[in-house]
Image (tube, rainbow, N blue to C red):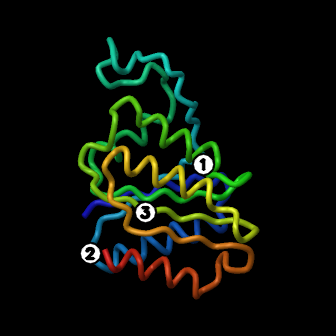
């Protein structure tokens, strides 16, 4: 299975550790994995201009780093969103990567998804999880698991082992 992880964090710390642990677990099970560092890319929000659904033929009018993500939406069997929590939701970089998929409607090959969330505080995940569940349901992706890490859980070997185990079980 080809898995793409969208790491939405602009920093390479807690969320990145979860993404790497997922990649390690999936590779140990024989899967092909690519991590795309969405948080370090220039991806604008959807303009809602409908160019993609009219003369664009599925192509967005904006010319930015979304072009680097689109092959993953077209060719991957599974998409994993990894995001830090900012004000009770996924950060803007992760949300832009999700919302800009609008131009194709849904991933072409992908049938599965997972969510990795990192925060400094416990109990702040409801908004992000609700958004993820609504999006995956709408585009027809089966949720394979959601893992959260708060405070000292971030980077802790037990939490990273939980992430690796989820990925290895796919």
| Residue contact at pointers 1 and 2, CB within 8 angstroms | no
Residue that badge 1 annotates = 39
Residue that badge 2 annotates = 30
Cα distance between the residues tagged 1 and 3: 18 Å
Dividing the image into 4 quarters, which one contains the N terminus?
A: bottom left
For mark 2, does the 10 Å Cα neighbourhood hold few (<14), some (14 to 19), or many (20 or more) residues?
few
For mark 1, does the 10 Å Cα neighbourhood hold few (<14), some (14 to 19), or many (20 or more) residues?
many
Horizontal and vertical percent for residue 89? 65, 52
Please give left or right for residue 6 compared with residue 103 in the image: right
Q: Nearer the viewer, residue 67 or 60?
A: 60
Circle 1 SS class: helix
**Residue name at image x 46 percent, y 35 percent:** 66
- Does residue 23 show up? yes
Cα distance between the residues tagged 1 and 2: 27 Å
| Residue contact at pointers 3 and 2, CB within 8 angstroms | no
For marks 3 and 2 on the same chain, the one whose residue lies earlier in the sequence: 2
For marks 1 and 3 on the same chain, the one whose residue lies earlier in the sequence: 1
Residue that badge 3 annotates = 114
């Amino acid at each position: 299975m080809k898995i793409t992880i969208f790491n939405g964090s602009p920093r390479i710390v807690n969320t990145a550790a979860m993404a790497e642990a997922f990649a390690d677990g999936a590779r140990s099970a024989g899967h092909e994995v690519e991590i795309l560092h969405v948080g370090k890319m220039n991806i604008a929000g959807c303009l809602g201009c409908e160019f993609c659904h009219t003369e664009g033929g599925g192509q967005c009018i904006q010319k930015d780093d979304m072009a680097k993500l689109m092959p993953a939406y077209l060719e991957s069997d599974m998409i994993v969103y990894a995001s830090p929590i900012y004000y009770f939701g996924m950060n803007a970089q992760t949300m832009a990567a999700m919302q800009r998929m609008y131009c194709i409607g849904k991933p072409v090959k992908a049938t599965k998804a997972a969510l990795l969330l990192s925060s400094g505080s416990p109990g702040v995940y409801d908004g992000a999880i609700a958004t993820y569940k609504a999006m995956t349901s709408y585009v027809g992706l089966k949720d394979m698991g959601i893992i959260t890490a708060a405070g000292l859980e971030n980077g802790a070997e037990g939490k990273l082992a939980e992430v690796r185990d989820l990925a290895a079980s796919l």
